[in-house]
Image (cartoon, rainbow, N blue to C red):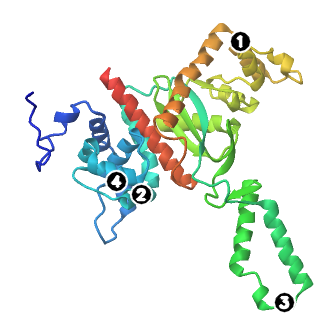
Amino acid sequence: MPTYKPYHPEQAELLPSHVKDVLGENHLCFLVHEVVEKLDIRPFEAAYGDAGGESPYHPRMMLKVWLYAFALKVKSTRKLEQRIKEDLGFRFLAGGCAPDFKTVSEFLRLQRAAIVEVFTQVLQLLRGAGLARVGEVAIDSTRIKGNASRDRVVQRAALQRQVEQWMDEVEDDPDRQPGREVSAEQRQRVREQLRQLEEMGEEKLSLTDPEARFLRTRPGYELGYTGEIAVSEDHFIVAQRVTQNKTDNASLLPMVEEVERQCRERPRRVLADSGFYSNANVEQLEQRGIDGYVPDSNLASELRGQRRAEEIDRQPVVDAGLHRMRQKLRTAAGRRQYQRRKQLVEPMIGSLKEHGGMRQFQRRGRSNVAVEWALAAVALNLKRWYRVRQG
């Protein structure tokens, strides 16, 4: 009979004297711990204030477990509660605390602004380490499904017909019985929904997440949001935001400005696909001294091996900036430079969606999904930093 190694599952103490004995000194959870310990947490403390009641969990602990959760594609609060109890890396970061799912969820709600600002703080640490260089940045966006039902939607035309019907009923029967009256609450709700639709310029409004928009995706139209990122020449996310934009034309300059704000440095070169092109955008890049590589849609078709852009144009090219952009991108050097966009930003979008679980938001409302997007971006930067450290 073989001799087995000792095995005593009933023993009370199963943990090692230190988690590094099991996970190793270079585990990702230790980088998360190290980085969060360097952050300024005064914005988190300000959100708690001096109110009495039960003492909250330490914001550093809560931030550590959430960042580590997003790094491991754990986005559900109930799953996070379970992992804090069972996973050694989470247990180390929690430091013996065991917040329940309601508590970790409330942390995200209460600390939305502070969490989004963590992206900036971590980015400054990266830049202090000589990383996240913005001589060249690539910008892209992706549509992300919201936590909203397609079946729970009201349409502007239906609401207007309802209002007209109520008005007709009043005119036809001014002496109708009180029991037939439409309640003030219902009238107010319909008026508010019509107001929202008018402000949005939309024909449909989601009842589960009124801030979500119907966005065009490859499978079809989905209720959701647009996540935007800018990626540095060494593959770090240097700007991020969530919008309700259906197209990207209006996003190029705001994202360039966001890179400059986050990094305190203006990028010298900007790469983006044709969705971000406009004559005004090209003109603004030139005025700011930024070398842009942003093809118009017809040139993009040409670069993919289709007909020459001028054969697709319905009118002669008269804009000087468009002419210069086409000339630049038709050179061998220009094509090589533009191809860098795919190498920089598209893998990061793919990582956010596939490895970060960002194919669908868990929460509702633009401010809440912005927290998810920021956490996912910070977590991806930390994982990238971890790989750089490993060599």
Sequence-first tag of 1 and 3: 3
Sequence-first tag of 4 and 3: 4
Mark 2 burial class by Cα count in 10 Å: few <14, some 14-19, many 20+: some
185 above or below 376? Answer: below
Residue 330: which numbered mark, if any? 1
Q: Quadrant of the C terminus?
A: top left
| Residue drawn where x is 39% and y is 61% of the image | 102
Secondary-structure class at tag 4? helix
Residue 105: which numbered mark, if any? 2
Give, as a three-letter code, the residue at label 3.
Arg
Inter-mark Cα distance, 2 to 1: 51 Å
Task: Kindly indicate the quadrant of the structure image that contains residue 167.
Answer: bottom right
| Residue drawn where x is 75% and y is 64% of the image | 194
User: Residue 58 placed where, x, y %?
Assistant: 29, 55
166 above or below 275? Answer: below
User: Residue 205 placed where, x, y %?
Assistant: 70, 58
Residue mark closest to the camera, 2 vs 4: 4
User: Residue 225 placed where, x, y %?
Assistant: 61, 46
Give, as a three-letter code, the residue at label 1.
Arg
Circle count: 4
| Residue drawn where x is 73% and y is 70% of the image | 190
Sequence-first tag of 2 and 1: 2
